[in-house]
Amino acid sequence: MKELIKKFIPAFVLSWYHFLLAFFGALIYRFPSKKLKVIGVTGTNGKTTVVSMTTTVLEEAGYKVASLSSIKFKIGEKERINTLKMTMPGRFKLQKFLREAVSAGCQYAVLEVSSEGVRQHRHRFIDFSIAVFTNLTPEHIESHGGFENYKKAKGRFFQSVKKIHIVNIDDKHAEYFLQFPAEKKYTYGLERGDINNKELRLDIKLPGQFNIYNALAAIAVGFSQGISLETCKKAVEGVKGVPGRMEMVVKEPFKVVVDYAVTPDALEGLYKTLKKEFSPKKLIAVFGACGGGRDKWRRPVLGEIAERYCDKIILTNEDPYEENPEKIIEDISKGIKKEHEKILDRRQAIKRALELASPGDVVAITGKGAEPQMALAKGKKIPWSDKEVVLEQFKELGI
């Protein structure tokens, strides 16, 4: 039905429809963002981890915080899993969440901001105090009609935030985001920027260079709010993990890691980190790709990256939506020249990876992270957890 509506209704009419929904959502919940300091985190990768770390920084400073990510809704101490399969919920859900945050006495709200959300005006009538940019690599190319449109959607969010901008100075698109006017601007990077790792020398628990960037982004937010660097540093160094983000599910006799990585940049970053941190005898990959016509271009690219870094590759189902899952796997397979396995049943694919693993190996299961559901055809969603399946199969195999 949604596809039919998009096909026959002019784009400008749909745009106004989304804009009006945003207005009425804010009106019904009495413009709650005006009573909060709202922080929006945008970029291709790292949004969820930055939201989590930023929340930790603000809480360490004594504030009551609400946060909304692709993993969970959090208001103060209360949390609930995000089962929507949306990085940025619809307008009414967003405004309701912000109203609940106000009612709970929160001073801050930290939100993920997606390009699709911006295109549908979900950020409208939310009084953002801070816009954070993590990084930018190709994603959602088909839905936006090209990378430039994708970048511009992120840019429109920055353009709408007039108070504070925080930008990863090491990203090649940094200058684009720095061009938008704001009352104050802060940059962060590994060796340069207003906040940089060279000066701080962070000792974070999460592996990978990308997590240093995530920590620096959160620290920059704290710094912009007058929180001491010592407090910010203590907060991010105390973060032991984020569900579904390079999450170590099994440590012995081999390691099993669950990660959300769905973009080429994120997948390559994960594999590089696993190689560097653990020097595995074998790196075994289990992954698929999202269906529903989403970013078909990247399927063979994901396959090519896995071939470069992994010793064993098992392709499997992920979130097929209306697409034929076997066709999705075949698309990925086109990027892989070496021998690999195709196991449609994700549970059986994970089981096979565990059977192949030996002491000193690392199994990397990607694409789902901490998502609690798998999306099938006709809007059907079934309960799913990569982590739980790993633990169940590990026990069943008696390893």
Image (spheres, rainbow, N blue to C red):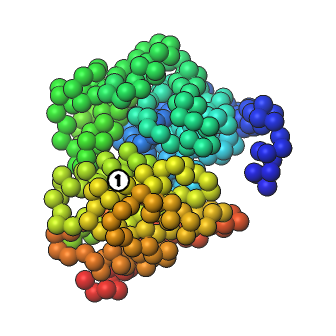
Q: Residue furthest front?
A: 337
Residue 338 shown left or right of residue 68 in the figure: left
| Secondary structure of residue under mark 1 | helix
Can residue 108 be seen by looking at this rendering? no
Q: Is residue 141 above or below residue 371?
A: above
Quadrant into which the N terminus falls: bottom right
Determine whether 89 is above or below 253 in the image.
above
Q: Residue at (58%, 31%) from the top-left corner?
A: 149
Is residue 314 visible in this depiction of the protein? yes
Count of numbered circles in the view: 1
Looking at the image, which residue is at 64% across and 35% down? 119
Depth check: 155 or 49 in front? 155
Residue 297 at x, y percent in the picture = 52, 49
Residue type at mark 1? Answer: Ile
Q: Quadrant of the C terminus?
A: bottom left
Which quarter of the picture shows residue 124?
Answer: top right
Q: Percent position (x, y) of residue 342?
A: 44, 73
User: Residue at 48% of width from left, 32% of height from top?
Assistant: 39
| Residue 237 x, y percent position in the rendering | 24, 43
Q: Residue at x 18, y 63 (%)?
A: 280
Q: Is residue 100 left or right of residue 353?
A: right
Vertical comparison of 388 with 8: above or below: below
Percent x, y of residue 4: 80, 51
Name the residue beneath numbered marker 1. Answer: 305
| Mark 1 nearby-residue class (10 Å; few <14, some 14–19, many ≥20) | some
Pick the residue in front: 232 or 162. 162
